[in-house]
Image (tube, coloured by chain):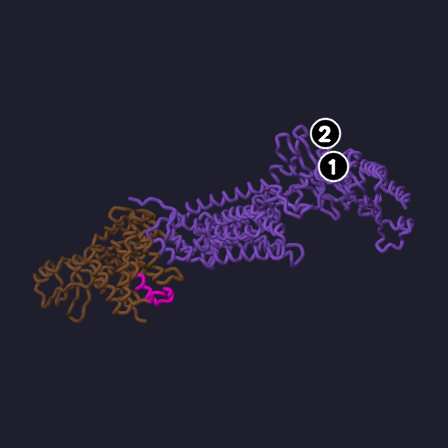
Chain colours: A purple, B brown
Amino acid sequence: MKSRISFFNKAIFRKNITRFFPVWVLYTIFLLLILASTVQARTTAIVAREITDFIGPMVWLNLAYGFLCGVLLVGDLFQGRMCNALHALPLRRETWLGTHIVTGILFSLVPNVLVSIVATVLMVDYAYLVLFWLAAATLQFLFFFGTALFAAVCAGSRLGMAAVYGIFHFITALIYALAELFYEPLLYGIRLDSDAFYRLFPVTQLQLSKYVDVDYSPTTLDLVYKGIVGETWIYLGLCAAVGVLFMGLALLVYRRRHLESAGDFLSLRPLQPVFLVLYTLGAGAIIFLFSGLFIGDPDYVFLAVGLVVGFFTGQMLLSRTVNVFRKKNFIRFAILIAAFGLSLGLAKLDPLGITKIVPKTEDVQWATIYSSDYDYYYSEVYKYNNFRITDPEEIDRLQQFHKLLINDRAEKTSPGVKVNIFYVRKDGTRLTRYYEIPAQSPLGQQAKTYFSDMRYIFQTNEPQLLHKHIESVSIDCYEQELLEKWGFSDSTNGITNITLKDPQKIAGLLDAIAADCRDGNMAQDWAFFQEEIQVFSLDFSISEDWKTNVGGKHYLQIFESSKNTIAYLREQLADAL
Amino acid sequence: MLKMEQVTKTFENFTALNNLSMTVPKGAVYGLVGPNGAGKSTAIRLLTGIYKPDCGSITLEGQPVYENPAAKIRMGLIPDEIFFFPSANLEEMRRYYKSIYPHFDDALFNRLYEVFQLPKKTPIRRFSKGMQKQAAFHLSICTRPEVLVLDEPVDGLDPVMRRQVWSLLLSDVAQRETTVLISSHNLRELEDICDHVGIMNQGQMLLERSLADMQGNTVKLQLVGDAPEGLEILHTSTSGRLSTLVVRGAAEEVTAKVAACSPAYFDVLPLSLEEIFIYELGGVNYEVKNILL
């Protein structure tokens, strides 16, 4: 008769608590010290704010502590003798791992609760914020601890566990880096969607997200609670659910685990080729990039060296021997390189014509075009861009421009201008393309027209509508001739600051800017004006309401070709002075 | 009865056990012997439910052993490589075992302190190898197992302590009819305490029977003259005119056959376990080579 399944054993639990007490006690002390350093000579409002701000960085602590708890509790699997001794005891594996899971959760929960109690006592008014911290820290830990347990049962050694854990949490970054480094340059017009990658990169996503919306009251300087950021909590909840799922997977893998794998790098055989491929490509990419640090542009010879080093050191780790230079491994390496080369070739040749896709006019709901120097956030820009082209004729013109960009591939020259085109199809699908073209080329000049569009500059085609929201315009002049004329020739910086407050004059200025926009001479990328001198800069003081709901630029550089604006400013400033 | 049937265990490309079957009768003291690498330790890890067999079954009184605490709670194991929690002392291990094994005998544990005289509060990892063996024995025997599995149990113990351990073991067998499986290379000692023997080689069981049967079924024949035909001779050596033969068969049967040939001199002697081991393995190409270094 088989014994019934139990998921908890008091003896193991007690042993875990006593055996690893220095760890959870030190963790508690560490958290208390952080709290103490936060509390020192600050108001409770500031401390409460810092506690909510600390939820994001807690990710790094939980990343490390989750791993530590996993390796301590399940690390006995990595030592053959200990592993055999423990598995000779009359306990099912479910009992063993189940007890470790409970213990691990308590290793985090108990210190967190203790620290929360102390924090609550110190600032009773903000107890709810401490609760948010407790909830977030616990959910984060569930995620990291669950994945650490899974890594532990997949690995045969601590190093292997660290590798699996690291791959799990940083695989998105690794794949993104590899794709950006090797594939993106081959795919003309295609930029990787960093948003999607970061969504799948919880370490960064959880760290950078805002969890609770609080702000200081301008009158009382108390902290005002505005609500939780639902999106972040849903994401965190999903991560915690993934952590719990991985605890279940860990149990399934552990039940099938061969104990004799103790000491191996990886105990789960299907993971070995995955590890080897990622490790090889990762090593290749790292050595390739490092070569760039020393010799300027990275050299592909170093990529080849990195791939060889990565593959064979990976084999050494997996087989625990340096004797890996065998025919069988050379054939595997050749297959890996051939597959990598083939994928690069396919990216370059684009047999599916992905780089040439331009949506049909009738399929497009709206489109936009924008330039951005913020590569990191480029895909976010469209969200804040109200320059939405919906007129079919305009969409058609944009498509013609897009086709020219595809057909007249331009070599990157400096200074270049970045052109992003974004379509939303009627079926809801999206298409983003990115091109870098010479600013002074015919295509560049066509792009300049788009980037001078009043709708692009101010997010509206109605200057008078914007006018109501402008309180004043601060003007800096850079032209020496004008400055001298106005008696500012001894100005140390050659710049003076004049503020335009008269609503009529501001309206006139907007009309002049609108005229330059129509002429295609108001684009803000310096690359378009490399031969020109900047004459003015305008800093618009716009209402918060407009900034929040409409957006757009409130700082403009006026170059020589913006003739209408310059003429108007000369006239107005001469009067003003 | 602890039973292993048609068990195969492979480690990557290496077959450690190949269709191994063995039966340890209830109440028996079973000696598992074999050359290094024969698969004894692997067999023990399978018998005690540590390893999962690739195929075949392992049962204790009909119950499967693997992942079955009800069966494992009736077994005690002293492995060849002892391991305890890194900082644990004997008292802590007692508490741990006591909370896992419901039949843990506290009184016996206290009595055994006088026998082994081990320090209670010193971490076991600081013990010598022999002391660690004693500690393992101290703990295991107090779990009151029905089956005690010992892998090289007295390895590293001094002669006095070896006797002490064997004595404790045999008194436990006598009092509680404990079934004992012992793997050891010390055949002289096994011969004194075992009533059943299994000889393993290359992951297979060469021979398994009671020691009495084994010793009664193979004899050493010393004679001057020619050996009669019809004897199953396992090994022959000659010194001058005296030939020494290891012959399969009962002593009476061999005596009768040799006497019928009227040799100048003959004597039929029982074989020691060590001799049986050597001659049986000699038949499967595992013999002492005459190598001069």
| Residue A331 appearing in the image | no
Quarter of the picture holding the C terminus of chain B: bottom left
Total residue callouts: 2
Amino acid bearing label 2: Asp
Residue at image position (74%, 37%) is A459
Residue at image position (64%, 32%) is A425
**Nearest to the observer: residue A399 or residue B177:** B177
Residue A323 in the image: state x and y as whole percent. Answer: 46, 59
**Nearest to the observer: residue A480 or residue B249:** A480
Q: Which residues are magenta?
A: B119-137
Report which residue position mark 2 lands on.
A391
Q: Secondary structure at mark 2?
A: loop
Amino acid bearing label 1: Gln
Alpha carbons under labels 1 and 2: distance apart? 16 Å
**Nearest to the observer: residue A78 or residue A347:** A78
Report which residue position mark 1 lands on.
A459
Badge 1 sits on which subunit? A
Callout 1 environment at 10 Å: few (<14), some (14 to 19), or many (20+)? some
